[in-house]
Amino acid sequence: MKEDSFNEFTLALEAYESLLHAETQAIAAKHLDTIEDILSKKDNSLNLLVSAKEHLQSDYQVDAEINSQVERVLQLQQRNTKAFNKFFNERSRKEKGLKEKLSTSDLRLKRTYQYPSL
């Protein structure tokens, strides 16, 4: 049982990390639709990750590999948040100059990155 919980958590963490890498690429490519799609997948993945974590024994924290992976995930999330904010602020300045309003989905994306989930 303990091994199953640990494997479930590891797989959920890997899936979340994969989505963060995809998000990094989408932000770099400035594909807002892709970013929004990934955010939805990240929400689901994060729910699975939290659920898997709840079933773990407390000793999982002594696993160096897991700690390293969790640290990578946190760094990726922070980097993506900064990259998106930079992109969004540049885009907002351009749009402000053109007197265009931000769409509802653009505002949702901005709020998501202002308050990261991890």
Image: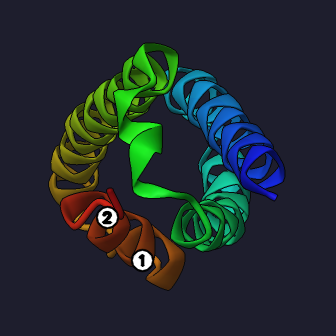
Percent coordinates x, y for residue 88 in the rendering: 29, 47
Q: Please tell me whether mark 1 sits on a helix, a strand or a loop.
A: helix
Percent coordinates x, y for residue 74 in the rendering: 32, 35
Percent coordinates x, y for residue 100 in the rendering: 32, 68
Cβ–Cβ under 8 Å for marks 1 and 2: yes
Position of 30 with respect to 97 (left or right) is: right
Q: Please tell me whether mark 2 sits on a helix, a strand or a loop.
A: helix
Q: Residue at x 40, y 55 (%)?
A: 58
Q: Residue at x 83, y 51 (%)?
A: 4
Q: Residues within 10 Å of mark 2 (few under 14, many from 20)?
A: some
Percent coordinates x, y for residue 33 in the rendering: 70, 55
**Where is mark 1, residue-wise?**
108
Position of 41 with respect to 94 (left or right) is: right
Q: CA distance from mark 1 to mark 2?
A: 5 Å
Position of 27 with respect to 77 (left or right) is: right
**Where is mark 2, residue-wise?**
110
The amino acid at mark 1 is Arg
Is 50 or 79 nearer to us in this picture? 50
Is 30 or 40 nearer to us in this picture? 40
The amino acid at mark 2 is Lys
Is 64 or 81 nearer to us in this picture? 64
For the C terminus, the image quarter is bottom left
6 lies above or below 76: below
